[in-house]
Image (cartoon, helix red, strand yellow):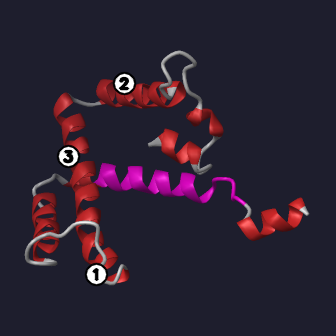
Amino acid sequence: MTYAFAEHRDVPALFGKVHPRYGTPVISIMFFCGIGGILAISGTFVWLAMMSVVARLATYLVTCLAVPVLRKRSGGQAGFRVPFGPVIPLSGAMLCLWLFTHASFQDIRAFVIACAAGAVLYLVRPRRMSSARNLQSSM
């Protein structure tokens, strides 16, 4: 993720640095290994697994909720069809919400804190100039 963010200039370009021989995002991998190591040492494996589950549930929930919105915006020109229209993605969203109710308060709180930290990093990132301003400055 940090590599993709670096490509879009949403995080420092350092995270986009790739290994000359293997082509892998070295700094991003080391960053996630460091964070994962700190979390593994500071908690239990069960806690780390629950954080992973809660984060994936949040991703699935947003994806399920985005399907009807994106289909409406595309005017029915979706790239793939799912039977029963919005029933399946909305059922998936309800299942995600139900599964969220089975997570502990501490797990949800830790996830919200991580999201807040990510939001702060996103808000303080260097702003890119719009393409219109780039064109004006190059003339």
Residue 108: x %, y % from top left? 25, 54
Is 122 left or right of 63, judged from the image as shown?
Answer: right
Please, what is the three-letter code of the amino acid marked with disc 1?
Gly
| Disc with the residue nearer the chain's start (1 vs 3) | 3
* Amino acid type of the residue that numbered disc 2 sits on in the rendered structure: Gly
Residues drawn in magenta = 109-128
Q: Look at discs 1 and 3 and give the one toward the viewer.
A: 1
Q: Secondary structure at mark 3?
A: helix
Residue wearing tag 1 = 76
Does the stretch in magenta take in 65? no
Q: How many marks?
A: 3
Marks 2 and 3, the one that precedes in the sequence? 2
Which corner quadrant holds the C terminus?
bottom right
Dot 3 surroundings within 10 Å: few (below 14), some, or many (20 or more)? some
Secondary element at tag 2: helix
Q: Is residue 99 left or right of residue 139?
A: left
- In this figure, which residue is indicated by the disc labeled 3? 53
- Mark 2 and mark 3 residues within 8 Å of each other at the beta carbon: no
Q: Nearer the viewer, residue 59 or 105?
A: 59
Residue 82 quadrant:
bottom left
Give percent across and percent down for residue 6. Answer: 57, 43
Please give the residue where the numbered disc 2 appears in the rendered image: 37
Image: 85 above or below 80: below
Q: Main secondary structure of the magenta part?
A: helix
Q: Position of residue 43 (x, y in %)?
A: 27, 31
For the residue labelled by badge 1, is the local secondary structure a helix, a strand or a loop? loop
Q: Nearer the viewer, residue 67 or 14?
A: 67
